[in-house]
Amino acid sequence: MPMRRSVRLLTIAVGVGAAALSTPAFAAAPTAAHSAPAQLSQAIAGHESHAFHAVRRATTNAAVQSTNWSGYAATGSTGAFKSVSASWVQPSVSCSSTTTYSSFWVGLDGYSNSALEQTGTEADCIGGRATYGAWWEVLPASESAYSGVTVAGGDSLTATVTDNGNGTFTMTLTDSTEGWSKSTTAAGSSGYQDSSAEVIAEAPEVNGGIAKLANFGTVAFTNSTAGGQAFGNTSPTEITMVNSAGTKVRAQPGSIAGGSFADTWKSS
């Protein structure tokens, strides 16, 4: 009898060991690499652009509505603004299965003409995954992704666009958190006028249609300047993003003081 009990106990022990060895690999905790946000690729950027869409005059002459822009535009005569700059903290996005996009940028032209020279970042939800990135654009071309850089929620960004006076514009974007700076000089859009400067949160145009707006929370723009002066001193036009029917606010800028204002997501 004692011998049989020993054999039975050995059989149980072997069975437990086999069960432990057969535990599925997916039960292990996910690695940091799998949970890291994706970065903007040129394959994605090549389908996006940022022209101003569907302006409606709001309740005052100092405010308009757009289906894809939210923020402020300084406006003037031809040649009024040769530079624009602003800083912001990159928003983070929490993603569901819905694909959504958001961009944050500074630019010259674009408000009252079809030209636009700009640079900025984005926070998208693509395939259920947060995707961040940095880009520049000169219309009518689509945006171009800056290669070899990483952008993350919470990064401190500064963007500048400058007319060099010889038909070219320099677009510079710096991420002081990640420790990189990118600068591109390119010919300006055909018919550029330097008649406006913008600091904008946007639902970009993707594959020819205005995208659903990612829930970016609130982005705070600081140190915004147009033509070397604080943005708030230019009597800028406030731009509120609305749906195509004009019945729902998508993103709303707060009041501007000096070079600072916040822009808040309201609906997709």
Image (cartoon, rainbow, N blue to C red):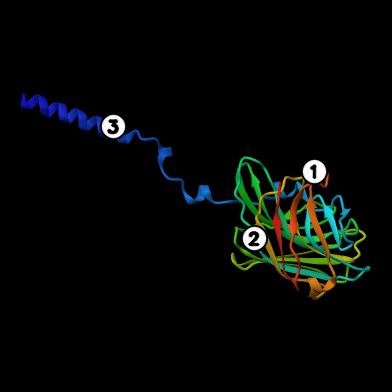
Earlier along the polypeptide chain: callout 2 or callout 3?
3
- Mark 2: give few (<14), some (14-19) or many (20+) Cα within 10 Å: many
> What's the residue type where badge 1 is placed?
Gly
**Residue 98 in the figure: left or right of residue 28:** right
Secondary structure found at label 1: strand
Q: Is residue 95 above or below residue 175?
A: above
The answer to whether any part of residue 202 appears in the image is no
Dividing the picture into quadrants, the one containing residue 151 is: bottom right
The answer to whether any part of residue 169 appears in the image is yes
**Residue 232 in the figure: left or right of residue 79:** left
Disc 2 designates what residue?
A: 90
> What's the residue type where badge 3 is placed?
Ala
Residue at point 76% right, 53% down?
143
Disc 1 designates what residue?
A: 209
Earlier along the polypeptide chain: callout 1 or callout 2?
2
Residue at point 66% right, 58% down?
218
Residue 18 image position (x, y, % from top left): 28, 32
Secondary structure found at label 3: helix
Disc 3 designates what residue?
A: 18
> Residue pushed farthest bottom?
229
